[in-house]
Amino acid sequence: MNRGNARLNSYALDQLQLVPEDRVLEVGFGGGTALPRLLRGATLVCGVDRSQDVVKTARRRFADAVSAGRAEFHVGTVEKLPLRDSTFDKTLSVHTVYFWQSLEAGSAVRAFWCQAGASCWASSPRSIWTG
């Protein structure tokens, strides 16, 4: 999936127009291909994925950023994000919509966690949500 999603991940990251002050939430980060670019462009990156193995791998792979307080990774779903009172400037989720319980629920959660600012959620090359 990492290779198959590379172009769409790159497109979605371009749409975010990251600035150093950004706090970014990525839901469903999978193999973590977008994470290095997010970490280079933002002050904080929070990743949530439904797979415990993926979260463990990300914590190990990005241990320096985690230790520095620039990254955090959690097991969870879009409907039940395991976050406290965090707010994010930008959000990213590529090819995850088919794991959501409903589009309405996922969209509502995204709106709740993302403050005013750019947001990009992409599900497939033919169906891209930005706003």
Image: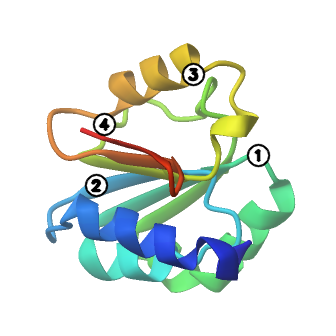
Q: Classify mark 3: helix, strand or loop.
A: helix
State the quadrant of the C terminus. Answer: top left
Q: Could you tell me how far apart the alpha carbons at marks 3 and 1 are, in whole angstroms?
A: 17 Å
In the rendered structure, the answer to whether residue 63 lies left or right of residue 13 reads: right
The residue lying toward the viewer, choosing from 89 and 69, is 89
Cα separation, mark 4 vs mark 2, equals 8 Å
Question: Which label belongs to residue 50?
Answer: 1
The reply to whether callout 2 and callout 1 are in contact (CB within 8 Å) is no
Residue 93 is marked as none
Q: Badge 2: few (under 14), some or many (20 or more) residues near its Cα, within 10 Å?
A: many
Disc 1 is placed on an element classified as loop
Identify the mark nearer the N-term, 4 or 1: 1
Which SS class for mark 2?
A: strand
What crowding class fits label 1: few (fewer than 14 Cα within 10 Å), some (14-19), or many (20 or more)?
some
Count neighbours of disc 4 (C-alpha within 10 A) and say few if under 14, some if 14 to 19, many if 20 or more: some
Q: Which mark is residue 87?
A: 4
Alpha carbon of mark 2 to alpha carbon of mark 1: how far? Answer: 21 Å
Picture layout, residue 56 above or below residue 74: below
Q: Which residue is mark 2?
A: 23
State which tag comes first along the sequence, 2 or 1: 2
- Calculate the distance from the C-alpha at mark 4 to the C-alpha at mark 1: 20 Å
Disc 3 crowd rating (10 Å Cα; few below 14, some 14-19, many 20+) is few
**First along the sequence among labels 4 and 3:** 4
Residue 85 horizontal/vertical position (percent): 38, 29
Residue 80 in the image: above or below residue 72: above
Q: In this rendering, which labeled residue sits more in front, label 3 or label 1?
A: 3
Mark linked to residue 103: 3
Residue type for callout 4: Thr
Distance from Cα at disc 4 to Cα at disc 3? 21 Å
Q: Position of residue 94 (x, y in %)?
A: 55, 55
- Quadrant showing the N terminus: bottom right
Classify residue 35 as left or right of residue 95. Answer: left
